[in-house]
Image (cartoon, helix red, strand yellow):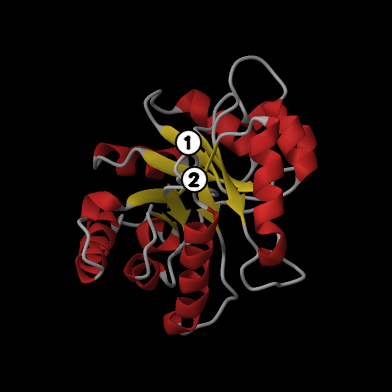
Amino acid sequence: MAPLRLAEVRLRMAAAAERSGRSADAVTLVAVSKGQPGAAIAAAYDLGQRDFGESRAQELATKAQELPRDISWHFIGPLQRNKVRIVRPTAVLLHSMDRMRLAGAWLKGPGIAPPVLLQVNIGREQQKAGVDPDEAAHELSAMLAMGLNVLGVMAIPPYDEDPEAARPFFRDLVVMRDQLASESVPLAVVSMGMTEDYEVAIEEGSTMIRVGRAIFGERMTHG
């Protein structure tokens, strides 16, 4: 198992938050643990990390059974409706709410459905999930009318080796959040920023980053 670089990521987070005029506490670090063995997650847990992100339903369910109960599990990947029953009982937050049929499936089941983030296809890329930016207001209103608890927005900008290339997309997402938010639905969460660009994302107003490789190194398992 590669040495964890959690402390380095936290230091960089704090510095980026300071540059944006905020404290490090204003940004939640979700350690993306997909493909990582339980031992690596346990090591991060021992260093104080509590929020972890998974993108495969069965992997999430298995890890949740094997690892400490006070871990907050985030589901960050595309979700098929037939996998909702596996994810819903465990996830504290679904980052990838992107269509009405998924919203309907998410609301079914016992108890109150966990909160979600509206995923926006901020770069309008055909291969990526997320609502079209022009449809975001309509989709949000419809989901709220159904009874979904929408805490904010999430996006993955077009990939570029230069982190600065993501900056305008991060700015666009924050502007969109500001336009969509209201007193009754503040949309306080802006989930944006990954290993390649999380510092830029924080500078532009991210409140939640999803970082895997910068913490764990390359994935230990695949599939």
Type of amino acid under label 1: Trp
Q: Is residue 90 above or below residue 167?
A: above
Dot placed on the residue nearer the N-terminal end, 2 or 1: 2
* Residue at position x 75%, y 31% in the image: 105
**How dense is the environment of label 2, judged by Cα within 10 Å: few (below 14), some, or many (20 and up)?**
many
Image coordinates for residue 52, horizontal then vertical, percent: 43, 42
Label 2: element kind: strand
* Residue 200 position by quadrant: bottom left
> Between 11 and 108, which is closer to the camera in this rendering?
108
Label 1: element kind: strand
Q: Residue furthest front?
A: 183
Image coordinates for residue 101, horizontal then vertical, percent: 80, 40
* Residue 190 position by quadrant: bottom left
3D distance between C-alphas at marks 2 and 1: 6 Å
* Residue at position x 52%, y 71% in the image: 172
Residue 53, disc: 2
Confirm or deny contact between disc 2 and disc 1 (CB under 8 A): yes
* Residue at position x 38%, y 52% in the image: 1
> Between 179 and 63, which is closer to the camera in this rendering?
179
Asked if one can make out residue 181 in the rendered structure from this viewpoint, the answer is yes
Type of amino acid under label 2: Gly
Residue 73, disc: 1
* Residue at position x 77%, y 37% in the image: 81
Image coordinates for residue 72, horizontal then vertical, percent: 42, 34
Image coordinates for residue 214, horizontal then vertical, percent: 38, 63
Residue 22, disc: none
**How dense is the environment of label 1, judged by Cα within 10 Å: few (below 14), some, or many (20 and up)?**
many
Q: How many marks?
A: 2
